């Protein structure tokens, strides 16, 4: 049973960076694709990007392309999401989630981490 | 990007009601459509994948249907624990998956 555990809440100043971690357990880490999804207060779900761990390659949503970096540490089975040049509107809960794939290329997100609250405040 | 539009954005219902939520994609996505349930302060939970496949452990009162551009999530008989927000997600356009705006299901 795959489980994802995220780091704790953060309070950051505008213009600074935040790095959120997501530690995986219960499966074969390098076989995963891990995605990051954020949810602003009272809003919907927005995919930021993901990393294919077997290849070590990350891809990003265009909106975040120049500010987000997703990396992984195989030795600790941990994925990181770093968002730079923070703005007030980056205040949100950030989730990591595994992208599961079936034999006919059907994909879904399961499981999810518990979420990390990031507050951007001066 | 493929857009997915959910309706309604909110819905009031009573325990025991049959409820339907719809999701429309901006282009055909075959059956690459998932449904999630989210409760306040919690992560989303997968309910349905590939439009109509029930995730393990999800009660059978939940069902999904549709293909192409139009999809539905149906709860056959609402239970108290079903009051939550529901999201659809298209996974046709790898890896740029998009979510619907959500449907908040509230107690009437």
Image (cartoon, coloured by chain):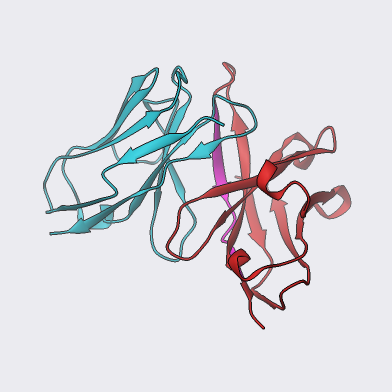
Kindly report the secondary structure that dominates the magenta region of the rendered protein: strand
Does residue A5 sit above or below B71 in this rendering? below
Q: Residue at x 76, y 71 (%)?
A: A15
The chain in red: A
**Which residue ends up furthest to the bottom in the rendered image?**
A122
Q: Quadrant of the C terminus of chain B?
A: bottom left
Q: Quadrant of the N terminus of chain B?
A: top right
A117 inside magenta stretch? yes
Does residue A105 sit above or below B21 in this rendering? above
Does residue B59 sit above or below A14 in this rendering? above
Q: Is residue B82 left or right of residue B13?
A: right
In the image, A97 versus B95, the foreground residue is B95
Does residue A29 sit above or below B84 in this rendering? above
The chain in cyan: B
Magenta stretch?
A107-118
Q: Is residue B17 visible?
A: yes
């Amino acid at each position: 049973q795959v489980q994802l555990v995220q780091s704790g809440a953060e309070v950051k100043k505008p213009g600074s960076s935040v790095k959120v971690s997501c530690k995986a357990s219960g499966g074969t880490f390098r076989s995963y694709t891990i995605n990051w999804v954020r949810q602003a207060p009272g809003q919907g779900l927005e995919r930021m990007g993901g990393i294919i761990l077997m290849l070590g390659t990350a891809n990003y949503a265009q909106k975040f392309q120049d500010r987000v970096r997703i990396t992984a540490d195989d030795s600790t089975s941990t994925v990181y999401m770093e968002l730079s040049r923070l703005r007030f509107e980056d205040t949100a809960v950030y989730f990591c989630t595994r992208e599961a794939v079936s034999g006919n290329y059907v994909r879904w997100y399961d499981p999810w981490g518990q979420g990390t609250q990031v507050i951007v405040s001066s | 990007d493929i857009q997915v539009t959910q309706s309604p954005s909110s819905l009031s219902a009573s325990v025991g009601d049959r409820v339907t939520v719809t999701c429309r994609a901006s282009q055909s996505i075959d059956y690459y459509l998932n449904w999630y349930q989210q409760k306040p302060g919690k992560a989303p939970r997968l309910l349905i994948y590939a439009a109509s496949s029930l995730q393990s452990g999800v009660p059978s009162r939940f069902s999904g249907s549709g293909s192409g551009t139009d999809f539905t999530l149906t709860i056959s008989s609402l239970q108290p624990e079903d009051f939550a927000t529901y999201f659809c997600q298209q996974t046709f356009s790898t890896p740029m998956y998009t979510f619907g705006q959500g449907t908040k299901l509230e107690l009437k």
